[in-house]
Image (cartoon, rainbow, N blue to C red):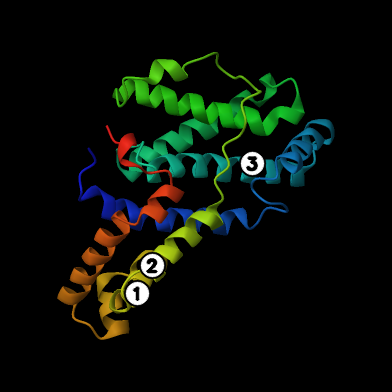
Amino acid sequence: MHSFLVVPAVLVMVSALLMDIEKIAARLPFHLDDVDQVNDAFERWRLQGEDQDHYVIALWTYCFVRRYFVTKFVSGFVQSDVATLDILIEQAYERVQTRQDELVDAQRYASWVSVICKNTFLNFLRRQLVFTSIDQEAGPVLQAEVKPVTHDIGILLEGLRQAIERLPDYLKDVARLRLLEKCSYQEIEERTGKPIASVRTYVHKTLVKIRSDTEFLSLIGWSESKEP
């Protein structure tokens, strides 16, 4: 079972991580999940070697890889700290960067990156022995036909915003400041006039309620059945 105390930390960290990815992905000339545009840009870069296409591909790859592992983190599959999350992201990103020449069909680039992420993740799970049923997911490495993982960052953040709106009125302001604006307890005290002790109590109550918000948990794919 997940420690009850882990959930509040996860919610705070993940809300910040998702917003950071959203800001970076906004620099792309297309949506993060526009697979056709990604593949076209990669193919153009291979054929023409344009710096702009190279930049776009590198940026898209970073955002996709980071979102993949953050999504695993928020879903409760990665039971570790943010440092480990960053290591997984770095490993997957470096594998993509160093093995791009291995991909024969440029129009499969997005799917190929997705598989690199999946294999990096499965290797991590095997090392950590998190699941006993991993063997059923094991398969040949680099199956380009695998469909890319698509979790819209905006949808996840909107789900958190909606969960906050379902809170009692007295908790909403503190919840927005803590989870969406990433304010410290001292900043919340200054902005709301509530003493830090009260702010901590409100944040705790907020996270307890969101932890039991079935709509939000369903959106992020977190269910009791997934908890080891």
Per the image, the residue denoted by label 3 is 58
Callout 2 secondary element: helix
Q: Is residue 160 left or right of residue 107?
A: left
The residues bearing labels 2 and 3 have C-alpha atoms spaced at a distance of 35 Å
Q: Is residue 117 left or right of residue 16?
A: right
Q: Residue furthest front?
A: 214
Q: Nearer the viewer, residue 110 or 145?
A: 145
Name the image quarter holding the N terminus. top left
| Viewer-nearest of discs 3 and 1 | 1
Per the image, the residue denoted by label 2 is 164
The residues bearing labels 3 and 1 have C-alpha atoms spaced at a distance of 38 Å
Total numbered badges shown on the rendered structure: 3
Instruction: Give the answer, above or below, for where 98 lies relative to 168.
Output: above
Instruction: Locate residue 119, reporting x and y percent.
Output: 49, 24
CB-based contact (under 8 Å), mark 2 and mark 1? yes
Instruction: Locate residue 186, reporting x and y percent.
Output: 25, 75
Rendered residue at 80%/41% (across/down): 50
Rendered residue at 44%/44% (across/down): 70
Mark nearer the N terminus (2 vs 3): 3
Q: Residues within 10 Å of mark 2 (few under 14, many from 20)?
A: many
* Three-letter code, disc 1: Lys
| Viewer-nearest of discs 2 and 3 | 2
Mark nearer the N terminus (2 vs 1): 2
Callout 3 secondary element: helix
Q: Is residue 144 left or right of residue 172?
A: right
CB-based contact (under 8 Å), mark 2 and mark 3? no
* Three-letter code, disc 3: Ala
Q: Nearer the viewer, residue 216 or 200?
A: 216
